[in-house]
């Protein structure tokens, strides 16, 4: 009975216009990671045809922040950490993906493209917004945002 009541409340809340039209000014910026989360959602709304927001995260923090803005596209949260993977499933709109890149350098874009295509999340050419900490080996806050087309790193140079 409690689960049915919670389900009814959630469905009612998400049907409300405010749940889907959360303004980008609703959350305080205050921190670099939050500014990037806000920018990622704004870019996903503005870049016509964007299909997803993709994060690479150890702790899950960026995925949680992006989730708070209720983007209209799914959030694929790639993480090498099994504990983070499990907790990410609790955030609104987040699809957790257990993922270990071959290297923590710029080749991560190739690894992400391959994983996205191999798992059937998206198709080659789909537009996505990617965000993570750069350089990847650092423990710094998330500070990278990239507008990306799935598969563009897999194509041979012209």
Image: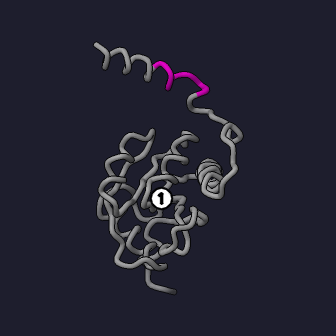
- The dominant secondary structure in magenta is helix
- Say above or below: 86 vs 150: above
What residue is at 44 percent from the left and 18 percent from the top?
9
In the depicted view, which residue is nearer to us: 38 or 28? 28
Counting from the top left corner in percent of width and height, residue 117 is at 34, 64
Counting from the top left corner in percent of width and height, residue 80 is at 34, 63
Q: Quadrant of residue 134?
A: bottom right
**Residue 5, visible in the rendered structure:** yes
Name the side, left or right, on which 144 lies relative to 29: left
Counting from the top left corner in percent of width and height, residue 122 is at 39, 57
What is the span of residues highlighted in magenta in the rendered image?
12-18
Quadrant for the N terminus, please. Answer: top left
What residue is at 29 percent from the left and 59 percent from the top?
119
In the depicted view, which residue is nearer to us: 145 or 58? 58
| Label 1, residues with CA under 10 Å away: few <14, some 14-19, many ≥20 | many
What residue is at 49 percent from the left and 73 percent from the top?
136
Magenta includes 16? yes
Label tally: 1
Counting from the top left corner in percent of width and height, residue 113 is at 40, 68
Name the side, left or right, on which 39 lies relative to 96: right
What residue is at 65 percent from the left and 58 percent from the top?
32
Residue at disc 1, secondary structure: strand
Name the side, left or right, on which 146 lies relative to 64: right
**Residue 47, visible in the rendered structure:** no
Magenta includes 81? no
Colour mode?
one colour
Q: Which residue is mark 1?
A: 55
Q: Residue furthest bottom?
A: 158
Name the side, left or right, on which 36 lies relative to 10: right
In the depicted view, which residue is nearer to us: 102 or 83? 83
- Say above or below: 149 vs 21: below
């Amino acid at each position: 009975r409690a689960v049915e009541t919670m389900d009814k409340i959630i469905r009612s809340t998400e049907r409300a216009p405010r749940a889907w039209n959360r303004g980008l000014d609703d959350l305080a910026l205050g921190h670099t990671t939050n500014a990037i989360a806000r920018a990622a959602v704004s870019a996903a709304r503005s870049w016509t045809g964007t299909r997803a927001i993709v994060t690479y995260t150890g702790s899950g923090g960026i995925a949680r922040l992006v989730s708070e803005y209720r983007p209209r596209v799914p959030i694929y949260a790639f993480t090498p950490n099994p504990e983070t993977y499990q907790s990410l499933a609790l955030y609104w709109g987040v699809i957790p993906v257990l993922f270990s890149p071959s290297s923590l350098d710029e080749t991560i874009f190739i690894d992400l493209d391959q994983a996205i295509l191999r798992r059937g999340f998206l198709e080659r050419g789909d537009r996505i917004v990617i965000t993570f900490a750069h350089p990847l080996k650092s423990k710094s806050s998330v500070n990278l945002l990239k507008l990306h087309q799935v598969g563009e790193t897999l194509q041979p140079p012209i």
